[in-house]
Image: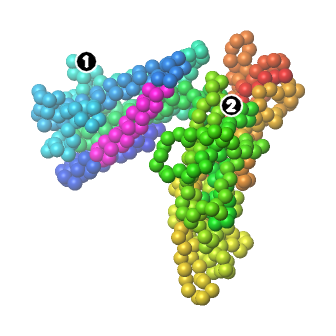
């Protein structure tokens, strides 16, 4: 309709066809038609990429379903249904591409045999590339078969004539409505549905509204398929395939998130080794913190380190020697690994260890880990972060850079791909990491003898800012109870960067408070860090012994990311 706002993709396609229509009267050049071929090839590559992502998500679903059929089953079954619907739709669009090529080349009787083949590597049907079709500019026969002869009246959808513009639109709108209506009943009877962002994204991607051409109301079918050359039609159908692949991958992502989203359990326990430095001078001590992610303060692990160095290839689990003693664990819950370097050679060194942890079943579980390679070297230059051994993306990280015996103003440094500048004090530098996973700092210096010397670069890891810890009434996700008097007067939620060396501004975008009344879950949402009036009304009615859940805590960090923080479950006492 006039004045209707189109999506960016529709605007692009509309502009493409305006240009195309204008050029039809001028005998479109071979170069222009080949341009559509290149666009189609790029779309095909994108389709393969998104399809690969969807396949990876499906594999993850299979793995999770195999380990917990009861919990994962409802989401797994819906994921299979989504995949089947999407694959059927993609197959139909591919067949429509082949049918269009057949219409333009006069191969209607044998089009499936000549234009569709089974791909050995992907296991799906593939369509002959438009690159190998001579009549890329043909549109008359194509229009007759797909649209019809009257620009104002497209051929209606007919099961006996399936590959028409009207049939395509009907199937796409049906697919859109199916995706928007995705719902799951969890294993414990709770309703689940995808996020509003997903539903809105589906709505925007699958818009097929009528419009105008030269001020004349025009049906969507005519805008896309009436007197449009074959090369452009094939490219447009490839873009529709990409929309479907994207919708499928996004739906699987939403469903996979539904499996884990509301569980406050240790579902992924990952051993982590965090060395304070990857560069150790002879005579110094290698220092590292070892912890188990999702660490529970009430259930500390035992951490052992092999006394023999690891060769870097043996992946077998460390065998505990009789009488082996675990390393110390600090008040912060971190294992304190200390390896003296006095007797170590000037080279790389690696160790492996073992974490013993009592799991949810009560059984002791073994979690092997490997210490990051660290290098023992003689003193040469000093390049070390002021606060830690890693750089955090999105913030200024102070770094000390010095060469022993050389004045600080004679030292220069660079870090390709990242912003590195001198700090306020001598020997201090500030790095603001870019998008890479590592930062390599190269140092040069004018030596006392007047010569210029370059030193080997030093590599550091680049990490995102860690997740903050939510707090409500002084309680954190590890707490299980809160006094009623404290609960009802708490004005809002906050997020703190626990044990983080930098001052980081955290903005809370939203959170949800869940109450249970008469066996029913009642949600109240806030679009800030503040308790809303609706929440306050519910809080005032809470009785001792009841539980209140604080979930979906969304925050933004200086690195531009939006994070979902751990849920909280507090019993009112």
Seen at 56% across and 76% down, the residue is 444
Q: Residue beneath label 2, please?
A: 567
Q: Main secondary structure of the magenta part?
A: helix
Mark found first going from the N terminus, 1 or 2:
1
Q: Nearer the viewer, residue 249 or 389?
A: 389
- The answer to whether residue 397 is seen in the rendering is no
**Quadrant of the frame with the C terminus:** top right
**Figure disc tally:** 2
- The answer to whether residue 523 is seen in the rendering is yes
The answer to which image quadrant residue 113 occupies is top left
Q: Is residue 30 left or right of residue 43?
A: left
First to last magenta residue range: 39-64
The answer to whether residue 340 is magenta is: no
Q: Position of residue 205 (x, y in %)?
A: 43, 35
Q: Nearer the viewer, residue 251 or 166?
A: 251
The secondary structure type at the circle numbered 2 is: loop
Q: Is residue 203 above or below residue 546?
A: below
Seen at 68% across and 36% down, the residue is 301
Q: Position of residue 497 (x, y in %)?
A: 72, 46
Q: Residue beneath label 1, please?
A: 159
Q: Which mark is residue 235?
A: none
Q: Nearer the viewer, residue 444 or 420?
A: 444
What is the residue that sits farthest to the bottom in this orientation? 449
Q: Is residue 360 above or below residue 54?
A: above
User: For the residues marked 1 and 2, what is the alpha-carbon distance in whole angstroms?
Assistant: 51 Å
Structural crowding at the residue carrying mark 2, measured as other residues with C-alpha within 10 Å and reported as few (<14), some (14–19) or many (≥20):
many
């Amino acid at each position: 309709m006039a004045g209707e706002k189109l999506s960016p993709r529709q605007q692009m396609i509309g502009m493409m066809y305006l240009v195309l229509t204008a050029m039809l009267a001028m005998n479109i050049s071979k170069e222009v038609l080949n341009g559509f071929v290149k666009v189609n090839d790029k779309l095909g590559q994108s389709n393969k990429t998104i399809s690969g992502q969807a396949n990876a998500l499906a594999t993850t679903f299979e793995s999770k379903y195999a380990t917990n059929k009861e919990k994962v089953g409802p989401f797994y079954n819906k994921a299979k249904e989504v995949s089947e619907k999407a694959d059927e739709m993609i197959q139909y669009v591919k067949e429509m591409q082949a049918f269009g090529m057949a219409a333009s080349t006069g191969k209607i009787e044998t089009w499936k045999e000549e234009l569709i083949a089974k791909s050995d590597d992907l296991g799906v049907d593939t369509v002959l590339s438009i690159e190998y079709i001579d009549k890329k500019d043909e549109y008359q026969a194509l229009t007759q078969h797909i649209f019809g002869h009257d620009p104002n009246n497209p051929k209606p959808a007919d099961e006996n004539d399936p590959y028409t513009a009207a049939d395509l639109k009907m199937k796409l709108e049906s697919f859109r409505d199916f995706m928007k209506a995705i719902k799951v009943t969890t294993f414990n009877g709770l309703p689940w549905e995808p996020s509003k962002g997903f539903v809105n994204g589906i709505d925007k991607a699958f818009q097929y509204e009528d419009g105008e051409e030269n001020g004349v109301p025009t049906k969507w079918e005519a805008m896309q398929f009436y007197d449009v050359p074959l090369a452009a039609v094939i490219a447009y159908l490839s873009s529709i395939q990409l929309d479907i692949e994207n919708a499928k991958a996004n739906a699987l992502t939403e469903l996979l998130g539904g499996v884990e989203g509301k569980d406050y359990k240790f579902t992924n326990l990952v051993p982590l080794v965090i060395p304070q430095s990857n560069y150790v001078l002879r005579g110094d001590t290698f220092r590292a913190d070892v912890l188990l992610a999702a660490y529970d303060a009430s259930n500390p692990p035992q951490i052992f380190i092999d006394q023999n160095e690891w060769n870097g290839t043996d992946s077998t689990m460390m065998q505990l020697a009789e009488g082996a003693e675990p390393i110390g664990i600090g008040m912060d819950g971190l294992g304190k690994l200390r390896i003296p370097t006095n007797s170590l050679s000037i080279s790389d060194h690696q160790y492996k260890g073992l974490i013993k942890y009592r799991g949810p079943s009560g059984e002791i579980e073994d979690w092997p880990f490997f210490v990051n390679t660290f290098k023992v070297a003689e003193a040469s230059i000093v390049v070390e972060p002021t606060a830690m051994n890693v750089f955090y993306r999105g913030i200024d990280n102070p770094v000390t850079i010095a060469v022993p015996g050389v004045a600080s103003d004679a030292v220069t440094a660079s870090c390709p791909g990242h912003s590195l500048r001198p700090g306020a004090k001598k020997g201090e530098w500030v790095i603001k990491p870019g998008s890479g996973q590592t930062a390599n700092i190269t140092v040069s210096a004018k030596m006392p003898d007047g010569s210029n010397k370059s030193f080997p670069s030093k590599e550091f890891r680049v990490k995102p800012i860690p997740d903050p810890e939510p707090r409500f009434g002084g309680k954190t996700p590890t707490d299980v109870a809160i006094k009623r008097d404290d609960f009802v007067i708490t004005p809002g939620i906050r997020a703190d960067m626990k044990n983080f060396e930098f001052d980081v501004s955290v903005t809370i975008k939203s959170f949800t408070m869940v109450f249970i009344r008469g066996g029913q879950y009642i949600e109240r949402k806030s679009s800030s860090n503040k308790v809303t009036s609706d929440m306050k009304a519910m809080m005032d009615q809470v009785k001792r012994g009841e539980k209140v859940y604080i979930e979906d805590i969304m925050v933004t960090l200086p690195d531009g990311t939006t994070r979902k923080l751990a849920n909280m479950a507090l019993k009112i006492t």
